[in-house]
Image (tube, rainbow, N blue to C red):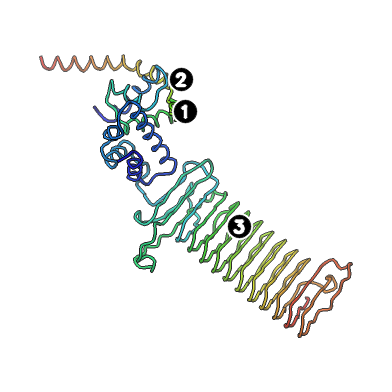
């Protein structure tokens, strides 16, 4: 066995190790081996001191017992952190409020099937979950024990949560105010409720996004082939995007609000936004009690209907459709402080003011 | 010898070697083993503990084309040695006391 092979097996027998531990221990032993070689010993003689990599690993673990190994599925950062950087794959991530003092992750997993690393660098706690290559049975969902990463967020924590996974949903509700949350996944839904944020960024695909009773400064939600749902979302700046799926929002308060989809309908009720933009194609747009200084509604091959809070005389209006009636009278009068644009084709435009 | 006591004494032995000058892993093992045998896996936590306690610092120096890690003692480490030597006179008194009682008993 050469020294690379020895070190590899030795370190592997010590797992799990944080990247920091791994590099420290590796460096320490590598140096000792190099020094031994310098003394004129051959690599075999130097390695013979250790016996087998497993034997040395056993001795090492005896002299260096793991701390807090009593709860193997509970993880915490070293010291105070203001950011969690959590990366995972094929497992959902759930945020829960906790009465505890520190951020904590609970995650039950099978050591044969996945690797978990947890380490702290400065103010950032890094947590990584890496599943092993799927065995044949697992590809078909047979014999899977699905774990879920639960992040316990204490009341006092108001920092940043960066959550990344794939094929697993991300959810959180009733958390204390957080300055930044970034939730990224694929093929699974993301939902947040009853929380206030500085910035909330949501990214997924082929699944829906749902935000309920949340407030904040900035919200960005992006998905595809999945619905966008919001109930009582008050963020200064809101940008919602999906495709081929409907958008349904109620109780929106914003300064800037935009929602875009395609091939599906948009329905928005009770919405106050200084700037509002709704755009889709081949799907109807229905607004009920929206108000704003600049309203842009655009679709095609479908109708635009509903009610706008306000006086039509306040608006410069540009409404256009084809092969269908439109109840609005266009006006380019610059004296009018607000703007309303409604564009579609082959569909009626019927917006009432009140 | 009792494991806990041995741990503390090993720490002090390492510091004693470093008092004579900075040293590196392999050399330390050899030097300390002159007094008590110590292995690679035993030395590792000792060095970590001493560093965490501020008794030593580390630096890297080029040696034969690689960077070798050196350990050197700090004032706190030197103070630890001083305290150990001072405690020794108390140890001697207690040793004499126990020895005397043991001899008297066997008479």
Neighbour tally class for label 2: few under 14, some 14-19, many 20 plus, Cα within 10 Å: few
Q: Which residue is labeled 3 in the image?
A: A200
Image depth: mark 3 or mark 1 in front: 1
Could you tell which of marks 2 and 1 lies nearer the N-terminus?
A: 1
Q: In this view, does A260 lie to the left or right of B39?
A: right
Q: Nearer the viewer, residue A325 or A275?
A: A325
* Inter-mark Cα distance, 2 to 1: 20 Å
| SS at badge 2 | helix
| SS at badge 3 | strand
Residue B60, numbered label: 1
Q: Which chain carries label 1?
A: B
For the image, the number of numbered tags is 3
Residue A159, compared with residue B42, is above or below; it is below
Q: Which chain carries label 3?
A: A
Q: Quadrant of residue B81?
A: top left
Q: Where is residue B71 in the image (x, y as percent from the top left)?
A: 42, 25
Neighbour tally class for label 1: few under 14, some 14-19, many 20 plus, Cα within 10 Å: few
Residue B75, numbered label: 2
């Amino acid at each position: 066995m050469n020294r690379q092979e020895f070190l590899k097996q030795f370190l592997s027998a010590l797992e799990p190790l944080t990247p920091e531990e791994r590099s420290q221990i590796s460096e320490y032993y590598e140096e000792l081996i190099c020094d031994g070689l310098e003394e004129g010993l051959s690599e075999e003689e130097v390695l013979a001191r250790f016996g087998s990599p497993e034997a040395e690993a056993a001795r090492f673990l005896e002299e260096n017992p793991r701390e807090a190994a009593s709860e193997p599925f509970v993880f915490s950062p070293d010291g105070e952190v203001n950011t969690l950087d959590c990366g995972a794959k094929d497992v959902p991530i759930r945020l829960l409020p906790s009465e505890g003092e520190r951020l904590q992750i609970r995650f039950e997993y099978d050591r044969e099937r996945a690797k978990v690393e947890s380490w702290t660098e400065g103010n950032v706690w890094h947590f990584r979950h890496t599943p092993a290559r799927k065995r044949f049975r697992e590809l078909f969902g047979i014999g899977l024990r699905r774990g879920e990463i639960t992040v316990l967020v204490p009341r006092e924590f108001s920092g940043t949560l960066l959550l990344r996974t794939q094929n697993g949903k991300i959810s959180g509700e009733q958390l204390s105010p957080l300055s930044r949350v970034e939730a990224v996944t694929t093929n699974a839904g993301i939902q947040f409720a009853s929380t206030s944020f500085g910035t909330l960024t949501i990214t997924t695909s082929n699944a829906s996004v749902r935000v309920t009773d949340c407030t904040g400064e900035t919200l960005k939600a992006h998905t595809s082939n999945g619905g966008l749902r919001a109930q009582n979302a008050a963020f200064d700046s809101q940008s919602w995007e999906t495709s081929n799926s409907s958008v349904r929002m109620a109780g929106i308060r914003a300064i800037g609000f935009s929602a875009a989809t395609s091939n599906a309908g948009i329905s928005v009720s009770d919405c106050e936004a200084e700037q509002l933009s709704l755009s889709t194609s081949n799907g109807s747009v229905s607004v009920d009690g929206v108000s704003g200084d600049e309203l842009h509604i655009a679709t095609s091959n479908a109708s635009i209907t509903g009610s706008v809070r306000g006086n039509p005389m306040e608006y410069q209006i540009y409404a256009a459709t084809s092969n269908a009636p439109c109840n609005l009278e266009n006006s380019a009068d610059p004296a009018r402080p607000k703007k309303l644009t409604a564009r579609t084709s082959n569909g009626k435009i019927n917006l009432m003011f009140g | 010898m009792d494991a806990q006591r041995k741990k503390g004494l090993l720490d002090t032995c390492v510091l004693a070697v470093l008092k004579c000058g900075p040293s590196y892993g392999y050399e330390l093992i050899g030097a300390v083993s002159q007094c008590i045998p110590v292995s690679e896996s035993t030395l590792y936590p000792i060095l970590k503990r001493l560093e965490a306690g501020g008794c030593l610092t580390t630096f890297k120096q080029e040696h034969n084309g690689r960077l070798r890690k050196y350990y050197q003692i700090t004032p706190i480490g030197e103070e630890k040695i001083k305290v150990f030597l001072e405690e020794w006179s108390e140890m001697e008194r207690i040793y004499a006391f126990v020895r005397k009682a043991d001899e008297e008993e066997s008479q």
